[in-house]
Image: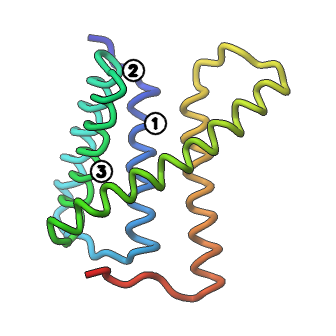
């Protein structure tokens, strides 16, 4: 089995976006065990490769929702029902941001007449990460507040 490095990096950037949202917007308390990050990274690599090799749309959706749930439940001190609720919400939020960036990058590539670019998904994910970070920075700076624990 050949590892698809761009898919792995793209999924790790997706996890970083979720962690940014949880840290900067929701202000969740992280667990101190650093081994949990290694578990999350390994699960992310495994899910990336399963989706890359045998991915259908339904399987991809289920696996990515499972990945978001694993990230939330292993890294943060949150309750099970809150992790399930946030999994659905963060899936929709990050999907909307990714779709918006995909359309923007496709438009730029069409205007510049660039086609067949291998790292297009990676560029979309990096632009999406910068957009999430910039929006969270502006929100926190302007309103000087964050969402406290939802429960």
Residue 50 lies, with reference to residue 77, above or below; the image says: above
Residue 62 lies, with reference to residue 31, above or below; the image says: above
Q: Quadrant of the C terminus?
A: bottom left
The answer to whether the residues at label 3 and label 2 have Cβ atoms under 8 Å apart is no
To which residue does mark 2 refer?
Answer: 4
Give the quadrant of residue 103: top right
Q: Position of residue 10 (x, y in %)?
A: 46, 36
Residues at marks 3 and 1, CA–CA distance in whole angstroms: 14 Å
Residues at marks 3 and 2, CA–CA distance in whole angstroms: 20 Å
The answer to whether the residues at label 3 and label 1 have Cβ atoms under 8 Å apart is no
Q: Could you tell whether 122 is left or right of 58 in the image?
A: right
Viewer-nearest of discs 3 and 1? 3
Along the viewing direction, whichever of 63 and 71 lies nearer the viewer: 63
Viewer-nearest of discs 3 and 2? 3
Determine whether the residue tagged by mark 2 lies in a helix, strand or loop: loop
Q: Could you tell whether 67 is left or right of 106 in the image?
A: left
To which residue does mark 3 refer?
Answer: 68
Local crowd at mark 1 within 10 Å, few (<14), some, or many (≥20)? Answer: some
Give the quadrant of residue 25: bottom left
Determine whether the residue tagged by mark 1 lies in a helix, strand or loop: helix
Please say which color scheme the image uses.
rainbow
Label located before the other in sequence (3 or 1): 1
Q: Position of residue 29 (x, y in %)?
A: 27, 76
| Residue at position x 32%, y 31% in the image | 60
Determine whether the residue tagged by mark 3 lies in a helix, strand or loop: helix
Kindly identify which numbered label has been placed on residue 64. none
Residues at marks 2 and 1, CA–CA distance in whole angstroms: 10 Å
Residue 128 lies, with reference to residue 149, above or below; the image says: above
To which residue does mark 1 refer?
Answer: 10
């Amino acid at each position: 089995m050949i590892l698809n490095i761009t898919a792995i990096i793209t999924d790790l950037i997706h996890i970083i976006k979720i962690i940014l949202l949880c840290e900067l917007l929701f202000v969740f308390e992280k667990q101190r065990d650093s081994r949990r990050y290694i578990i999350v990274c390994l699960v992310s690599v495994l899910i990336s490769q399963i989706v890359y090799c045998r991915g259908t749309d339904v399987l991809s959706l289920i696996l990515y929702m499972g990945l978001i749930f694993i990230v939330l439940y292993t890294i943060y001190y949150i309750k099970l029902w809150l992790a399930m609720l946030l999994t659905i919400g963060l899936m929709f939020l990050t999907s909307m941001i990714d779709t918006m960036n995909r359309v923007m990058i496709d438009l730029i590539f069409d205007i510049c007449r660039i086609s067949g670019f291998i790292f297009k998904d990676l560029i979309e994910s990096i632009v999406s990460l910068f957009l999430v970070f910039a929006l969270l920075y502006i929100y926190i700076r302007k309103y000087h507040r964050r969402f406290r624990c939802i429960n």
